[in-house]
Amino acid sequence: LPCQLNRRRASAKPAPFGGARIALAERDASTDLLASITVPTLVITGDLDELIDPEISEKMAAAIHGSVFQEILGYGHLTPMEAPKEWSKVVDNFLKASA
């Protein structure tokens, strides 16, 4: 699967991605809202994520009272696609613990 993702990424037209990056960079910060989340929350990241630094994801989780932070080792930003079994196990364990 990582090879398929790399081929898709290589064949993608850069313009939409450039526009999306600009929109993300220019949007208002909303991290102050994280503390207001009151539902069970799971934050998952791949330790090789180059789009959102795993440290940022961990800080987001820390700002959400009672949240669970889980890092999946050896994978990047698209953990559900890159590591579906590992990702599903993390989600399943979270749901069981939250029930």
Image: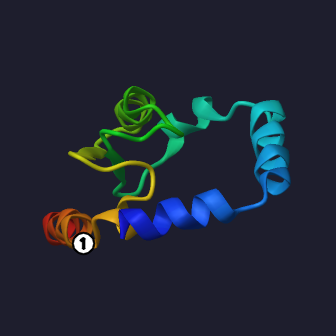
Residue 98, position in %: x, y? Answer: 21, 65
For residue 64, which quarter of the picture?
A: top left
Instruction: Report the side of 51 relative to 2 (left or right).
Output: right
Who's the residue at 81% across and 44% down the image?
18
Residue 1 sits above or below residue 9 on the image: below
* Residue appearing at x 34%, y 57% in the figure: 40
Colour setting:
rainbow
Whether 9 is drawn above or below 66: the answer is: below
Nearer to me, 6 or 21: 6
- Residue 75, image x and y in percent? 30, 50
Name which residue type carries label 1. Answer: Ser
The image quadrant of residue 25 is: top right
Q: How many marks?
A: 1
Q: Quadrant of residue 57?
A: top left
Residue 19, percent across and down? 85, 47
> What residue do we see at 45% from left, 70% from top?
4
Name the residue that disc number 1 marks. 88
Residue 87 screen position, x and y as percent:
26, 65
Location of the N terminus by quadrant is: bottom left
Q: State the quadrant of the C terminus.
A: bottom left
Query: Judging from the image, what secondary structure is the residue with disc 1 in?
Result: helix
Q: Nearer the viewer, residue 16 or 31?
A: 16
Within 10 angstroms of label 1, few (less than 14), some, or many (20 or more) residues?
Answer: few
Pick the residue in front: 87 or 96. Answer: 87
Between residues 37 and 15, which one lies in front from this camera angle? 15
Q: Is residue 19 left or right of residue 90?
A: right
Look at 20% across and 45% down and name the residue there. Answer: 73
Left or right of residue 87, residue 89 in this image: left
